[in-house]
């Protein structure tokens, strides 16, 4: 695999990039690795860029498209989002279009005409448009166009080792032969070293610049709970984020519907989203969330890849996802504006058993799928820094001793007294069960449950029966998970895994080793904050003015039939409410306000500012 691209921070940036960033988007500095990625496109050098959600990947191919001669073709699976992306580009004065199955015949002819006339700088297409049935007609149009580069977004979809493999992406490789002088550039937010290598191979990237940013999202606070007390804990999450945007992921359609109804009963503006809904209903619910007409979307994993709402303040998983890649991608939709956001995972061992059954039934079960699922289970059960666990999974070193932004580092896990004795009781029960039963039976015996299966097996006569009757099911399972994660226990078998002692577990049982166990406390109302440089804060922001500007943005968005973020992101509204510009010149000085938007929207926002200031 190619080596990572060298840092160009000591050289002078291309002045054309600096000019385009400020004039079109109102940015005066590059985010990490943006400059290197843009320069790779300008140099015509293949590249792979891995940046977390919110790291500014899209700008890396949008800005060079305005400088290089020819057309930039963006390959994206996000058909539901293409219109919003193009609307945002057009709003900034960029000649862009999308070409997919959502266009009616008249719209398709308009795009084809603009393509042939060389009037476009960026064209968004789906992989099926380039490699599926009937792709040849479209490819001939591209042959006649001056294609400068291909940008493959969500590139992890091309890898069979990735978490969202899409077979049609594998058909993009032959485009290299059809467009031999055109550079290819892959972009993704989630890719382990193995996935990165596979992307390079499948797209046949040559002498590629490999640009891998940090996977750390310092503004995200991670918390993990057992699902036994989902309802009261979820309600506390919603109370902390009343009126704010959030996503709740569920592992089944039934749970989505049930939870969406319950949120409605609680007075939360929420709607469901899953593949079982009619297309029109599903699209309307997603649009309502994107346009901030509702606060919460309750969804299966079918929801999310097309979401660009920047002010999502919380993401909840009501069940464990099937891999850390899925978890990182889905939690990454929180806090894209740089402000603190909360990510809460509720899990149960039943989640992992359910994924095993589902993957087997669908023919997707493999050693690789098993390793992904096991890694997710270890993350859920872990009792150490969650930021560290995530970064280490993706091959990144975490230098900080404590993140200050997870339940472990915030001190929300209570150290259990006499943990060794508690652990020995659990380990002893595993031994008394001849190491032939699963976690459920261990829990039943320790809690003294006289059910038919326990009594029928004679396990009610074991010396460990009822030994921990006062400990709740969720708490006891949590201790067993910790013993598994720390290597004192192991599980064998896939479909019905049994619990066994390891050599370390045997030593702990003999009293030759120490261990620590933790129970969960309620999270504090005000968690400690991480480094101020990593978080875009509310300091100096007039909150009432911010809300007035949000109302104006919503009015304009509804009038133009676009999501609010297409008008301005929350970060721009915060700066407006912080600095209170009085002229277009002062407005242009704000980060994120380019010349086209200043001319188009500036008078409206300046007028609202003046009205507010006069009334206050």
Image (tube, helix red, strand yellow):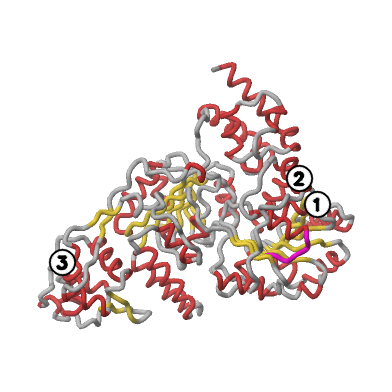
Horizontal arrangement in the rendering, residue 536 relative to residue 237 (left or right): right
Q: Circle 2 sits in a helix, a strand or a loop, which is it?
A: helix
Q: CA distance from mark 1 to mark 3?
A: 68 Å
Are the two marked residues, 2 and 1, in contact with CB atoms closer than 8 angstroms? Answer: yes
Residue 291 drawn above or below residue 280: above
Identify the residue at image location x=48%, y=48%: 219
Residue holding disc 2: 20
Per the picture, the main secondary structure of the magenta-coloured stretch is loop
Residue 261 drawn above or below residue 161: above
Identify the residue at image location x=69%, y=58%: 37
Q: Earlier in the sequence, mark 1 or mark 3?
A: 1
Identify the residue at image location x=63%, y=74%: 1
Horizontal arrangement in the rendering, residue 557 relative to residue 44 (left or right): left
Q: Circle 1 sits in a helix, a strand or a loop, which is it?
A: loop
Q: CA distance from mark 2 to mark 1?
A: 8 Å
Horizontal arrangement in the rendering, residue 520 relative to residue 288 (left or right): left
Residue holding disc 1: 67
Q: Earlier in the sequence, mark 2 or mark 1?
A: 2
Q: Is residue 46 magenta?
A: yes
Q: Circle 3 sits in a helix, a strand or a loop, which is it?
A: helix
Residue holding disc 3: 421
Which residues make up the magenta segment?
43-47
In which quadrant of the rendered view does residue 50 lie? Answer: bottom right
């Amino acid at each position: 695999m190619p080596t990572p691209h060298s840092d160009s921070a000591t050289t002078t940036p291309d002045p054309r990039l600096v000019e385009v960033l400020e004039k079109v988007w109102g940015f005066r500095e590059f985010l990490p690795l943006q400059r290197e990625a843009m320069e790779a496109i300008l140099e015509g050098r293949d590249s792979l860029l891995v940046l977390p959600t919110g790291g500014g990947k899209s700008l890396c191919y949008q800005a060079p498209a305005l400088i290089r001669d020819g057309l930039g073709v963006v390959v994206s699976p996000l058909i539901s989002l293409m219109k919003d992306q193009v609307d945002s580009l057009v709003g900034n004065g960029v000649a862009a279009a999308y070409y997919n199955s959502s266009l009616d015949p008249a719209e398709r002819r308009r795009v084809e005409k603009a393509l042939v006339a060389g009037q476009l700088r960026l064209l968004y297409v789906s992989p099926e448009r380039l490699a599926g049935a009937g792709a040849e007609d479209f490819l001939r149009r591209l042959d006649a166009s001056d294609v400068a580069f291909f940008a493959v977004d969500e590139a992890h979809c091309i890898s069979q080792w990735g978490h969202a493999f899409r077979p049609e992406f594998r058909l993009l490789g032959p485009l290299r032969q059809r467009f031999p002088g055109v550079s290819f550039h892959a972009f993704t937010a989630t890719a382990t070293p193995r996935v990165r290598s596979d992307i390079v191979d499948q797209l046949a990237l040559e002498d590629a610049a490999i640009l891998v940013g940090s996977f750390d999202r310092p503004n995200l606070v991670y918390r993990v709970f057992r699902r036994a007390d989902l309802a009261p804990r979820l309600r506390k999450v919603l109370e902390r984020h009343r009126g704010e945007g959030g996503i709740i992921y569920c592992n089944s359609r039934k749970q989505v519907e049930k939870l969406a109804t319950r949120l409605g009963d609680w007075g939360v503006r929420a709607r469901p989203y899953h593949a079982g809904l009619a297309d029109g209903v599903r699209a309307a619910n997603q649009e309502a969330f994107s346009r901030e007409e509702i606060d919460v979307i309750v969804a299966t994993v079918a929801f999310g890849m097309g979401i660009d709402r920047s002010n999502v303040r919380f993401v909840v998983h009501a069940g464990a996802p099937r891999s850390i890649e899925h978890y990182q991608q889905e939690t990454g939709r929180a806090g894209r504006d740089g402000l603190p956001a909360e990510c809460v995972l509720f899990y149960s061992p039943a989640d992992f058993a359910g994924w095993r059954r589902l993957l087997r039934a669908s023919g997707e079960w493999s050693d690789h799928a098993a390793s992904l699922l096991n890694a997710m289970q270890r993350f859920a059960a872990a009792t150490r820094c969650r930021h560290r666990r995530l970064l280490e999974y993706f091959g990144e070193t975490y230098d900080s001793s404590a993140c200050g932004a997870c339940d472990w580092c915030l001190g929300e896990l209570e150290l259990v007294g006499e943990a060794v004795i508690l652990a020995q009781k659990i380990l002893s029960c595993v031994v008394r069960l001849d190491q032939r039963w699963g976690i459920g039976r261990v829990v039943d015996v320790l809690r003294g449950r006289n059910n038919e299966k326990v009594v029928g097996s004679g396990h009610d006569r074991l010396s460990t029966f009822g030994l921990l009757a006062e400990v709740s099911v969720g708490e006891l399972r949590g201790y067993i998970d910790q013993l598994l994660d720390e290597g004192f226990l192991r599980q064998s078998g896939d479909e019905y895994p049994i619990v066994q002692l390891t050599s370390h577990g045997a030593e702990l049982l003999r009293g030759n080793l120490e261990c620590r166990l933790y129970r969960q406390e309620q999270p504090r109302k005000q968690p400690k904050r991480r480094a101020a440089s990593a978080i875009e804060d509310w300091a100096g922001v007039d909150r009432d003015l911010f809300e007035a500007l949000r109302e104006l943005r919503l009015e304009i968005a509804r009038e133009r039939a676009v999501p609010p973020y297409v008008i301005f992101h929350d970060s721009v509204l915060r700066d407006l409410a912080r600095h209170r510009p009085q002229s277009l010149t002062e407005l242009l000085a704000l980060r994120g306000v380019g010349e086209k938007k200043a001319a188009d929207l500036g008078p409206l926002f300046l007028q609202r500012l003046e009205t507010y200031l006069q009334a206050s």
